[in-house]
Image (cartoon, helix red, strand yellow):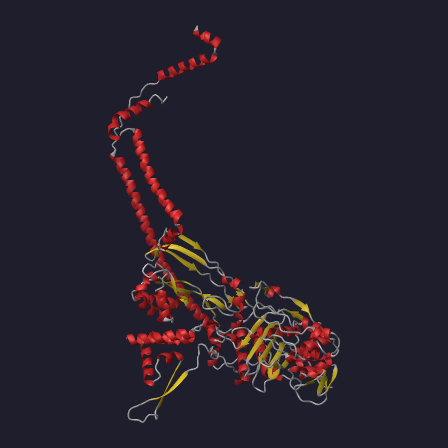
Amino acid sequence: MSSTLSTASASPSRIRTARTAAAAVERARLALVPSRQVNAPRAPFAVLVLVVLAAGVVGLLMFNTHMQQSSFYATRLQQRADSLEARREALDLKLDQLRDPQHLAAAGHKLGMVVPANPAMVNLATGKILGLAVPATSADSMRINPDKAARPSLIDPKPLVHKVIATVPGTTPGTATATTTGTTTGTSTGKTTAKTGTAGKASAGKTAGNSGQTKVSHGTASTGAGTRADRKGAGTASQGASR
Amino acid sequence: MTQPHRPAARNRARSGQRTLRGSSESRLRVGMIAIAIVLSFFGARLFQLQGLDPKAYAAKADAEGLVSVPLPATRGTITDRNGVPLAQTVSGMMIIADPHVTRPHAEPIARILANKLGLDYFDVLATLRKSNGPKATSDLQFAYVARRVPSGIATAAVDAVDKAGYLGVTTANDPLRDYPGHDIAANLLGFMGSDGNPLSGLELSFNNLLAGKDGKETYEVGDGNRIPLGENTEVKPVNGKSLKLTIDRDVQWYAQRVLRTAVQGAGGQSGAAVAIDTKTGEILALADYPTFDANNASASPEADRGSRALSNVYEPGSVEKVLTTSSLIDAGKVTPRTKIKVPHQLPVLDAVIHDYFQHNFIRLTLAGVIAKSSNIGTVLATRAFSHQQLWSYLDKFGLGHKTDIGITGETKGLLPPVASWSELTQATIAFGQGVSVNALQMAAAVNTVANGGEYISPSLIQGKATTADGSVVGTDETTRHRVVSPAAASAESRMMEMVVTQGAGTAPGAAIPGYRVAGKTGTAQEVGATCGCYDGSLAVSFAGFAPADAPRFTVYVVIQHPKSSAASGGGTAGPVVRKILSYLLQKYAVPPTDTPPARLPVLW
């Protein structure tokens, strides 16, 4: 009755009623499932998690350690490679020196060879000599070794010569004259008497490093070489005194 | 479906734990406040780090074990035409100190390093103590003790420091420039300053090509080893490209030694020798004297370190007659057999022209004028030319134009503009006074005659390369243009053969038995540096090519200001040309042409 009424008056309400009914039927079908008691032991899982965790930590540690170890190893190998490379370079340089035309010419010169005065060649096909083969004479020889390069005056100053009269007991002053020669370096630190000059030289000779440095002062050239030389001289003096 | 369950669950939780944790709302509130407090700390710290003074903190972080090492680019090699290195970069090392570590033991370490490396003790000491702030707080960890040290020496020095038990001194790669030939082609190659910058020659003009670009590596270190997964940035160095020259190292060496022997023998001030491949214009040797050791450039005076063959201009003297007479033959004005009456002197305007040798009135052919090197004969022959004609021929021979082989500092010489010429100017220019050249220009001009009348621009670089000033030079850029006809060049060549003919010419000492050699002597008066006039100093020169009928090589030698009074183009420079030509003919296996030598009448 009501259904016909609702059908006649309003269709939406009829549909809602139908749905509610369907939901009720559906709900009626559902039943509460009894909760199943799971009695699985928890310990293995905890252990498993711990083991995975521990393995991870240990693995990470080992990985890190291994990386560090590799780094040390790489550093060592790199050093070895560097030293081998340096050796190869040194050998290459030596080879270059041996191949240098200057070296070859000097070696040939030692054997008494000279550059041929006149070009002549043999045609291997016919055995004929082309050009005039003239024996070389000593006039064909030439200077091979380079002459000493002229040094700039800045680093090769003229030696300062101080002539002093040595006063030796027993002899009359003025008979014996001693001469000290040296570069500006030596004379600026040393005193003008012959005795202290030689003493300074001896101390410089003892300290090997400083004697090396005084040599270098001639080879290196740069602006301000004079001041550098002076400082070296001062170094020699101070170190000599400290010993 | 689930909605009905939810309220039930909430109720259950509430009923079970209310006593322990209080209400959920208060818990939430407390939690939020705690989180907000913590986050506000973070925020404040973030603002402090990023907003207030980010740079200082970044720098502080960098200083914490972060090391930055330059990765030097390897400079390109300069090789000769056969690939033999003339300038190369070998593995040098830089010695680095960590002043943070070395400061307490600076003195003993400095002593070891100064001894082993030949450095100044006090300089090393200062480096080992270097700081970037007040001494107590300084954290400078990087300072150069020495750069570009040969690796063997560097390693030995650092090993000695290690052995003595001191830390903080290490090495790193730092390429080192080496010139295996010392003075071979040094004037062309130039050299590197102690700061690693090129100072002259090819090193300077092709620096862009050779230098490459340095890289940089920054990484974290711990205890001297780099931390594997630490911060690491690397900018790889770009190595320089190599440069191949047309120079033959052996020929260059030989030319330098022969030239030196001759210059010293004549008591000369300087000298230059140029050897050119006739057909290609490639420079096989360009020797200068005095020269220097490129490995130790500072030991030589600065004036000796450039190339005088290019920078020094002088009046070429009689060698120039080759250009004048071949032009005259090309223009059809004369032939080698043209008869010329040569008086003992020739007044031109207000001057009087003499020959270098005393003679009365003589009858010379044009070949005789060349063979005997008569100034008067040349002037008389050149009267057939207008000023403009002679000027344009000489201009085409390359006089007054730079050769542009890629070396900075070349002077272009001087061919006076034709408008300024007088009759006297033309007369003196005809025999090589009043015009100035450099040695390479003169060699290229004579090479034109050797090459059948076609000028080839000389080149020093194989292929092509761009100089610092942007010009492209090299064998690929060779230009050629015709100056005189092949017939005129051949006639000139036959006249030049008479120069080295015994009895006829001025330079029998330049003849190579078995070969046909063409040559021309030059003994020019030089303008003194002080007075601006001819002060009696000379430039003696000789240009030659062989074989005369099929030229392969052109060699030009000039010796400046010989002291010896016997010095002459034929006697002093001629033998040098002969030796260099002989060496070239032998080295490149050029057989004699087996044709009868030129026999031209000298007198009539």
Asked if residue B516 shows in the view, the reply is no
- Tell me which corner region of the image, top left, top right, bottom left or bottom right, holds residue B409: bottom right
Query: Does B137 sit above or below residue B302?
Result: above
Query: Does B99 sit above or below residue B573?
Result: above
Farthest front residue in view = B52
Farthest top residue in view = A1
Q: Which residue is drawn at 30% across and 76% down?
A: A240
What is the count of numbered marks? 0
Pick the quarter of the image with the N terminus of chain B.
top left
Expressed as whole percent of the image width and height from the top left, the position of residue A196 reads 32, 82
* Camera-side residue of A147 and B368: A147
* Camera-side residue of B6 and A142: B6
Pick the quarter of the image with the C terminus of chain B.
bottom right
Asked if residue B358 shows in the view, the reply is yes
* Camera-side residue of B104 and B147: B104
Expressed as whole percent of the image width and height from the top left, the position of residue B72 reads 45, 61
Expressed as whole percent of the image width and height from the top left, the position of residue B2 reads 36, 23
Left or right of A123: which side holds A74? left
Q: Which residue is drawn at 56% across and 78% down?
A: B271
Left or right of B312: which side holds A41? left
